[in-house]
Amino acid sequence: MATTVKDSTLSLNDVIKSSGKKTTETSSLGSTVAAKAGNKQTLGKDAFLQLLVTQMQHQNPLDPQDNSEFVAQLAQFSSLEGITSLNESVNAITGNYKSSQALQASSLVGRSVITQSDKAVVDTTKSFTGSVVVPQSISAATITITDKDGKVVKTLQMGETKAGNAEFIWDGTNDAGQKVDPGTYSFAAKTKVEGKQVEMYTLLPATVSSVTISQTGGELMLNLAGLGSVALSKVQTIGI
């Protein structure tokens, strides 16, 4: 009497889909895997291993799984394991980065920083020091200081200066030699290069009043008293 062997070979897709043609055992496993996967139907490493073992158990003994297919599935499992480990490492690095940002934030509040800006909160009872970024050697330059209403308070003259950061000092007086009130002042530095007027950047001090930490891994933002926010990367110098 001839004996007929039924082909029970299953693929991973067959197990995942849990079709009605499967045995009760396979359907039960498919339901368990689907429950573990959750709403997103993600396949974890444990579920992947269970599916692989189930597939091997249900292969046709007269036509077993090809070695190349088996190796390919093992490679998929290895890749899945590596991705899982990588995700864990990235999450750990992200957590450490946020902790580092918090530490930086606590140490910067109340400290003085120097950043590229055209405005500064000035205590005119004492001398104010700032810098001008000189693009190339110049013979002369002017620094115009205006108040919050746009009125010119003082004009400082700079002589011959080499390329680099050139420091200037304002004693808090106007052009008439009188002390002006403390407040927010604007600084505009200009020079002439080959007969053309050129504006130069100014580096001015400010006090950090608070720090904003990004919840999405963005850059640390410093909130400067009376001046708004600036990215930490824009800060030139951090003082006391």
Image (cartoon, helix red, strand yellow):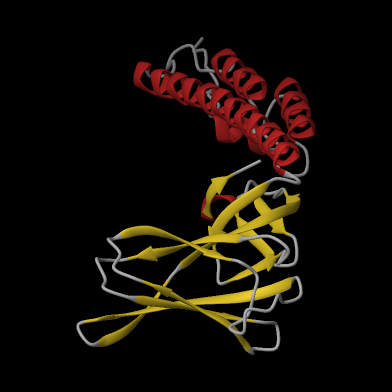
In percent of the image, x 70 and y 24: which residue is there? 26
Relative height, residue 185 to residue 89 (above, below): below
Q: Viewer-proximal residue, 47 or 109?
A: 109
Is residue 62 rendered to the left or right of residue 32? left
User: How many numbered circles are shown?
Assistant: 0
In percent of the image, x 32 and y 75: which residue is there? 140
Q: Viewer-proximal residue, 184 or 81?
A: 184
Residue 8, visible in the rendered structure: no
Whole-percent x, y for residue 42 in the image: 67, 37
Q: Viewer-proximal residue, 130 or 7?
A: 130
Pick the quarter of the image with the C terminus: top right
- Residue reaching furthest to the left: 194
Residue 203, visible in the rendered structure: yes
Whole-percent x, y for residue 51 in the image: 62, 22
Whole-percent x, y for residue 190 in the image: 40, 79
Q: Quadrant of residue 100?
A: top right
Relative height, residue 157 to residue 227 (above, below): below
Is residue 77 rendered to the left or right of residue 139? right
Is residue 94 rendered to the left or right of residue 195? right
- Residue reaching furthest to the front: 177
Whole-percent x, y for residue 127 in the image: 63, 60
Q: Quadrant of residue 149?
A: bottom right
Relative height, residue 106 to residue 169 (above, below): above
In percent of the image, x 63 and y 34: which residue is there? 97
Q: Quadrant of residue 46?
A: top right
